[in-house]
Image: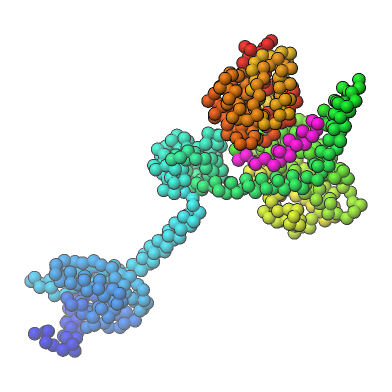
Amino acid sequence: MESNRDPESEVRVLRERVAQLESAMSSRADPVLLSLLQNATSFLSVITPDGRIMATGRESEAYGSVVGRSVFEFTPQGSHEVLAQALARLRETGQPVTYEAGGFGENGEPDHVYHVRAVPVITEGVLQAIVVVPTDITDRVRLERSLRESNDTLRMAMSATGMGFWRWDIPQDQLEWDQRLRDIFGVEETPVDYGDYRKLIHPDDLPAVEGAVRQALEQGRYPTIEHRILRGNDGAERWILAVATVKRDDAGKPVMLLGGGLDITDRKQLVRQMELAERVQAVGQLAAGIAHNFNNLLAVIIPTLSMAVDRPTPDDTSALRMGLTAAMQARDLVKSMFALTAAPDPRARGSSDAGEVVKRTVAMARAAFPREIAVACGVDPAPAPVSMPASNLEQVVLNLLTNARDAIQEQQPGGSAEIRVTVTYQKGSGGTRDMARISVSDTGAGMTEETRRRIFEPFFTTKPRDRGTGLGLATVAARVRNAGGNVACESQRGRGTTFTIELPLRPISGIYPAPEAAPLPERMAGRVLVIDDEDMVRGMLRRVFEAAGLEVYEAASAAAARAVLERQPVDLVFLDHSMPAESGLAALPSLRARTQAPVVLFTGHAPAVPADIAALLRKPARPEEILRTAYELLPRAEAAGG
């Protein structure tokens, strides 16, 4: 039996068989088949059922003749089990087998991968040999591995950014969101369509989102925007950074939007905190000048009132008018300080008149800056409605003014000390928009070119640590860019600096003149509840209201106010906010449970005002302002002459 032969005898017999096959093939094979065999890969083989090579298509340069050797010699150790299982399955079933296994290249290179088809050769029911047809799939496997690694890297990067991704099929109006985006929006299921998605957008920001979508559909470009959402699971307000790209069909029509959304709520809160810190720092730098001017105003008010009380004369009226004028200037100064230190409102949108904002901010700077610095202001008379809220524009202009002041104070003694602020308009041409141009120039020390290039970088400053954080000009640049404008700086060492801001002008119809107020009646009727912990404030309001014919009830606390409302109906409530034990807004729900009368929040502090507050009136206020507010809110049927 062949099983008793030694290996050398088996090899000799196999070689004889191969020689016979080759001789027969050469004499009788189809020329086409012969050509295919001779040019096939060197690993196309005929092997015995136990894996010894009987013949190969051609010899490889790396291995030479391999007839008589085991296929396991040319298979890496890691693939031996796969090969053994495949041969065993073929011997058992007599059916072709396919498998993948590691191997070597024709020149002996390691780390190749083959897809192998093993076909049995059966004669009279007996397995005589196996034809092994390998296909080198190394390049495909390496490509797939590379793609998997790239996808893994992309998934890791996407996970690290925290961005969720979406797709909108425009013709079908179908949305696809990944799990991350559903988590951000607080929904378990993707919105059915665009209309369903709109329900998750904050109502105040919906026009901005719809405008971005409209621009994408009409112009093929989706602008990067920041907007708020109301989470589906808890209604919480969150900020989203939205980006997208437009896909078009062959006709150029938008058919799909692909984009992502990133939760930037924490970043927005940090930015607001930094902006508030910058505002407080600005007021701190102005404090000395403000205190000086406030003292000057008190120097008029106190003697005027003292003389009117202690030594009344027929000339008291003109003197008191002078004292009142000084008091109103002091009030405006305090209001400006509150405006600067108030936390920026992330929801602030819309227009402001650049000219009016500049004039108001320059007036405050004049009051706070050293008298030796001349601050000139030139504003074109026409309204300049720009796409930036007044509070933001005030901070931008004030930052530039304080930088100009510091630059002047850095120069050598005896130099010119002048700041010039102008507001002009530039008519757009060639499709560009009309712009308002605000320039702030100083005659200060100027900057080197290296410093000028870096001034808008966050935290970059040339000032001492106690005088600057490096956020002022970075904030200016960010706010101007967010409003669709641009900012530039020209400076020369020893010659001064000019900052120029350009902001898009909105249609003039966006700013409406204040309607003329109807004259106040001499006498009014109604019941007013005054809630304030300050005796003098309650006394002042009582005197104003009673002089106009109104019935007044007083309460020094929220608890006392509730007691009044339990026994007495009223038509109007004047409510202080800052009170000990219980603030005005904290007490509001309990007051609302006892009266539906309109509530006026009368305070020097400006909190976020809830919707059920009828009006906000800031302290201090003139009697005319107090009565105007009351007249507009009292039931008209009860107002005498109303």
- Residue closest to the far top: 641
Q: Nearer the viewer, residue 575 or 272?
A: 575
Work out whether 449 lies above or below 617.
below
Q: Magenta residues, as a range?
A: 327-346
Residue at 86% from the left image edge and 36% from the top image edge? 299
Please state which of residues 524 and 116 is positioned toward the viewer in this rendering.
Answer: 524
What color scheme is it? rainbow
Q: Is residue 386 magenta?
A: no
**Quadrant of the rendered structure where residue 98 is?**
bottom left
The image quarter in which residue 50 lies: bottom left
> Is residue 431 toward the left or the right of residue 593 in the image?
right
Q: Position of residue 622 (x, y in %)?
A: 75, 25
Q: Is residue 366 above or below residue 587?
A: below
Magenta span includes 341 = yes
Q: Identify the residue at image location x=29%, y=77%.
A: 77
Q: Is residue 220 left or right of residue 42?
A: right
Q: In this rendering, is residue 567 above or below 14? A: above
Q: What secondary structure is the stretch in magenta mostly built from?
A: helix
Query: Closer to the camera, 238 or 433?
Result: 238
Residue in view at x 19 percent, y 66 percent: 96
Task: Give the x, y percent position of residue 476.
Answer: 69, 46
- Look at the image and tell me whether residue 305 can be seen: yes
Q: How many marks?
A: 0
At which x and y percent is residue 188? 39, 43
- Quadrant of the image containing the C terminus: top right
411 sits to left or right of 181 = right
Which quadrant holds residue 99?
bottom left
Which quarter of the image is occupied by the N terminus? Answer: bottom left
The residue located at (22%, 83%) in the rendering is 68
Q: Is residue 38 visible?
A: no
Q: Position of residue 226 (x, y in %)?
A: 56, 43
